Image (tube, rainbow, N blue to C red):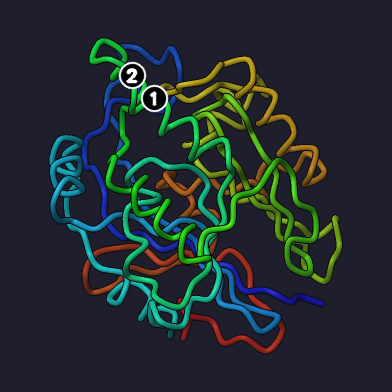
């Protein structure tokens, strides 16, 4: 029995991204295409997103242009590809506070947001440090942090303290402290509540299959290139992801990996952005196949 449909939706991309930014130590290995995506999980009466992308305006636009992001589309355009609107989303799990994951909360007026308390509080701390420490704010829009605080004031941001198993029926959240960011987290979806039929949505502790499977699939875990935490902690978080899916690396989904379009059913929208169908709930109609 499958309770949830899972789609990875590309909303923009970087055409030429240094590979060393996504695989630690991959110097002089050229460039890759880096999709910017988020995840939709639909089922059990919920429309859930893992991350919300960013809004291509104000400082979000500045950061997008700094990273050479192109072809940005709004959530209303992207979600339409799976028959949803931003207003349909009731739950958002934020894996971490970088602008391309946490930068568009205002487009989801009916959602409650969930992130690790450590993620929000530590980035507020980092924001308060003198200028020489501003590397620690790499990829973060300070306005996103302020919006997170406002959501908490409104009762729409719930801050977590570590792992939350059965966050919703068949959905678990796991903390990955001091890895890619201070309070990163990732999500496991258990179809029918079964650990044998599970998927892990990795957040940015895995950008590429290579992080999870090693070079040429040699099994040696490789951390991502950008971290405010520790490569050691990142490797252990990758290993935990694998344990949670019976060490089947194809069940760990890195949303910045262009290759997922080849591993799973997919199509390209008229905006030239991919829709990847990881799994379908019983009775759900495919959004990528006619």
Rendering coords of residue 37 (x, y %): 39, 55
Q: Residue at x 29, y 63 (%)?
A: 273
Q: Position of residue 264 (x, y in %)?
A: 54, 60
**In this rendering, does residue 206 appear at all?**
no
Q: Which mark is residue 11?
A: none
For the residue carrying disc 2, how many other residues have a C-alpha within 10 Å: few (<14), some (14-19), or many (20+)? few
Picture coordinates of residue 69, whole percent (x, y): 19, 45
Residue 61 drawn above or below residue 10: above
- Mark 2–mark 1 distance (CA, rounded to whole Å): 5 Å
Q: Is residue 196 left or right of residue 188?
A: right
Answer above or below: position of 129 versus 272. above
Image quadrant in which you'd find residue 179: top right
User: So how many labels did they put on this image?
Assistant: 2
Would you name the residue on which mark 2 appears?
129
Name the residue tied to disc 1.
126
Give how far across and how far down residue 130 sits, in percent.
28, 15
Report the front residue among 157 and 80: 157
């Amino acid at each position: 029995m499958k309770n949830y449909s899972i789609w990875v939706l590309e909303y923009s991309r970087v055409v030429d991204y240094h590979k060393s930014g996504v695989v630690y130590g991959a110097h002089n290995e050229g460039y890759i295409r880096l999709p910017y995506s988020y995840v939709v999980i639909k089922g059990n009466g919920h429309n859930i997103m893992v991350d919300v992308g960013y809004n291509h305006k104000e400082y979000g636009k500045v950061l997008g242009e700094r990273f050479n992001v192109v072809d940005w589309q709004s959530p209303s355009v992207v979600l339409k590809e799976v028959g949803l609107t931003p207003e349909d989303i009731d739950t958002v799990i934020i894996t971490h506070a970088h602008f391309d994951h946490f930068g568009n909360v205002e487009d989801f007026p009916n959602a409650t947001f969930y992130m690790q308390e450590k993620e929000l509080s530590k980035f507020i701390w980092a924001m308060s440090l003198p200028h020489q420490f501003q590397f620690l704010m790499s990829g973060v829009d300070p306005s996103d942090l302020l919006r997170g605080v406002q959501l908490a004031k409104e009762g729409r941001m719930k801050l977590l303290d570590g792992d939350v198993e059965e966050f919703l029926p068949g959905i678990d959240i796991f903390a990955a402290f001091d890895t890619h960011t201070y309070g990163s987290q990732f999500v496991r979806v258990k179809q029918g509540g079964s650990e044998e039929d599970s998927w892990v949505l990795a957040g940015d502790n895995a950008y590429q299959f290579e992080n999870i499977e090693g070079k040429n699939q040699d099994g040696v875990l490789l951390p991502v290139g950008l971290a405010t935490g520790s490569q050691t902690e990142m490797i252990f978080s990758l290993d935990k992801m694998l344990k949670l899916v019976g060490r089947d690396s194809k069940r760990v989904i890195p949303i910045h990996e262009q290759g997922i379009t080849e591993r799973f059913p997919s199509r390209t929208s008229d905006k030239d952005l991919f829709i990847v169908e990881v799994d379908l709930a019983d009775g759900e109609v495919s959004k990528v196949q006619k």
